Image (cartoon, rainbow, N blue to C red):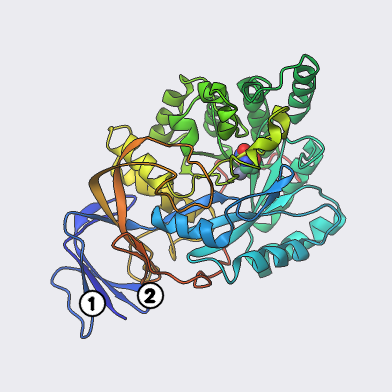
Amino acid sequence: MKKIIKNGTIVTATDTYQAELLIEDGKIAQIGTNLSAIGAEIVDAKGCLVFPGGIDPHTHLDMPFGGTITKDDFESGTIAAAFGGTTSIIDFCLTNKGEPLKDAIQTWHGKSKDKAVIDYGFHLMIGEINDKVLNELPQVINEEGITSFKVFMAYKNVLQADDETLFRTLVTAKEHGGLVMVHAENGDVIDYLTKKALEEGKTEPIYHALTRPQELEGEATGRAARLTGLANSQLYVVHVSCSDAVEQIAEARSKGFNVWGETCPQYLVLDQSYLEKPNFEGAKYVWSPPLREKWNQEVLWNALKNGTLQTFGSDQCSFDFKGQKELGRNDFTKIPNGGPIIEDRLTILFSEGVKKGRISLNQFVDLTSTRVAKLFGLFPKKGTIAIGADADLVIFDPNVERVISAETHHMAVDYNAFEGMKVTGEPVSVLVRGDYVIRDKQFVGKPGSGQYLKREKYSLNTPLNQNEKLSI
Ligand code: URP
Ligand code: ZN
Ligand code: ZN
C-alpha cells in the first residue's frame, strides 16, 4: 500500500529539511511538498524526525558462546531491534573448524529465515585459514553476498586465530573485495594474566577487566592495522573500547591505511566500576573488551565526533543473569561475555550524543546507518532517504523522556545493562520496505518477513595508501 509521510523533519547523514515522502512498492518514490497519490495512507509525523532505519553492523543472535547460547534469537532479537529503530542487522555466522563454510551459512539461514522481522545479512567468523577455506571464500563473497569476515585475536583455544590467519585473510579480502573485521585484544597475554589471577584466588567479575588491560587492546589494534597496511588491504576494528585502540586507529589512518573503527553504547556510558557491583551483579557487565576506566569515554566521544571511529554497533550478545551469567559465580572466566543492547543502541546515541551536543544529528544518522551501509555493501538500497532506496524509515519523537528498564524492554533477557538510565527520544513507528513493523509503539510485524541481504563487495577500497608495497 502507498503511504505519504507528512509534517516530519527528514534527517540524512548530510541534510536536515522539511519534506514529504511518498512510499510505493516498498521504496521511496518521491520526496517533495504537497505530494498526493490515489489510495495512499497519510502518515502524520508532526513533531517527529524521519530518518533512515538503523543498521546494526554487529549482532550475535542464537549463537553458541561461552558454554551456553545467546538468549535472544532472530525473532526476539529483531523485534527488540525494530522497537529501537533498527531495520537491518548484520549478524555473525559462527564457523566451526573443519566444517565447510557453506554448511555454517546454511545453519545461520535456518536460524533466521522464519524468524526475522527486519532485514538481515551475515558476516563470517573465520577461525582457521587453510587452502579449503581460501578456496571457499570467493564463492561466499560472490554467491552468498557475505563480504566481511571477523578474525579473533583473543579467546585463546576457542576462537583465537594466529597472525598468519589474520594476514592471509587480509590478503584474500583485498583480492576478492572483502572487509576484514578484527576483535583486537592480545589473547596470549590475557590467557597468561587470567591463569595467574585464578591461581591467586581472584575469581570475582572485576578480574575480567583487570586481566584484559587496555594496553592489550591497543597492541592488538596496532598489530592488525600494520598488517593491513602491509597487505594494502582493509580493516574494520569492532567494539573499540579505549584510548589505546583509538590512538592506533588514528595513527593508521594518518598513514593512509584503510582502517575503520566501531564503538558500542556500553563503552560510552558504562565503566569498569560496574564490574564491582555486589552480589555477583558485576557479571552483567562482562564484555570483551571489558568496560574501561571512565576517562576513556571522553576519548571515544571525540573519536566519534572527529571521524576516527565511523560506526556504532550494539555487539548484541545477550545472556540471562540467572542460569547463564551465573555460570561464572566461582570463576570469572566462565561468565559468558556479552550483553543485551540491540534495542537501546539508537536512543542512547541520540540522547547522550545529539541531545548533549557531543555529535550532530547528521553524524548520528551516519554512525547508526549510512556509514554502515556504505562499508558493508548495502548502500544506496539501505542507509539513506533517497528516491529508489528501500523505505526503511524511523519516525522518531526527539522529545519524549523515558527510563530504560528490563520491565519494558522487548529483549528476551532478565536484565537490562542500562537499567534506570533516563533517556530522551524514542521511535514511534518503524517501517521496513514500506511496511510497518512498529506502529504507534506497538509491534505489528510478522516473523519471517525480514529478507536476507546479499551484500556488495567492499567498494571503498581505493587505497588511501597508493603505494602497492607488496605483491602477495
Ligand atoms: O563480550 C562480547 N563482546 N561478546 C560478544 C562476542 C564478541 O567478541 O564480539
Ligand atoms: Zn569480539
Ligand atoms: Zn561481538
Foreground mark, 2 or 1, reads: 1
Residue at point 72%, 27% (across, down): 330
Q: In the depicted view, which residue is nearer to us: 398 or 301?
A: 398
* 381 relative to 240 in the view: left or right: left
Q: Residue 307, relative to residue 393: is it above or below?
A: above
The spot of residue 311 in percent (x, y) is 47, 43
Question: Picture quarter containing residue 238?
Answer: top right
Q: Secondary structure at mark 2?
A: loop
The spot of residue 320 in percent (x, y) is 59, 44
Which of disc 1 and disc 2 is earlier in sequence? 2
> Pointer 2: what residue?
26
Q: Does the beta carbon of the residue at mark 2 sit less than 8 Å from ligand 3?
A: no
Q: Secondary structure at mark 1?
A: strand
Quadrant position of the N terminus in the picture: bottom left
Work out how far the residue at label 2 is from the one at label 1, CA to CA, in angstroms.
13 Å
**Residue type of the residue flagged with mark 2:** Gly
Q: In the depicted view, which residue is nearer to us: 334 or 235?
A: 334
Visible residue check, residue 105? yes
Question: Picture quarter containing residue 181?
Answer: top right
**Residue type of the residue flagged with mark 1:** Glu
The spot of residue 138 in percent (x, y) is 73, 62
Q: Does the beta carbon of the residue at mark 1 sit less than 8 Å from ligand 3?
A: no
Q: Extreme left residue here?
A: 34
User: How crowded is the residue under tag 1: few (<14 C-alpha within 10 Å), some, or many (20+)?
Assistant: some
> Pointer 1: what residue?
41
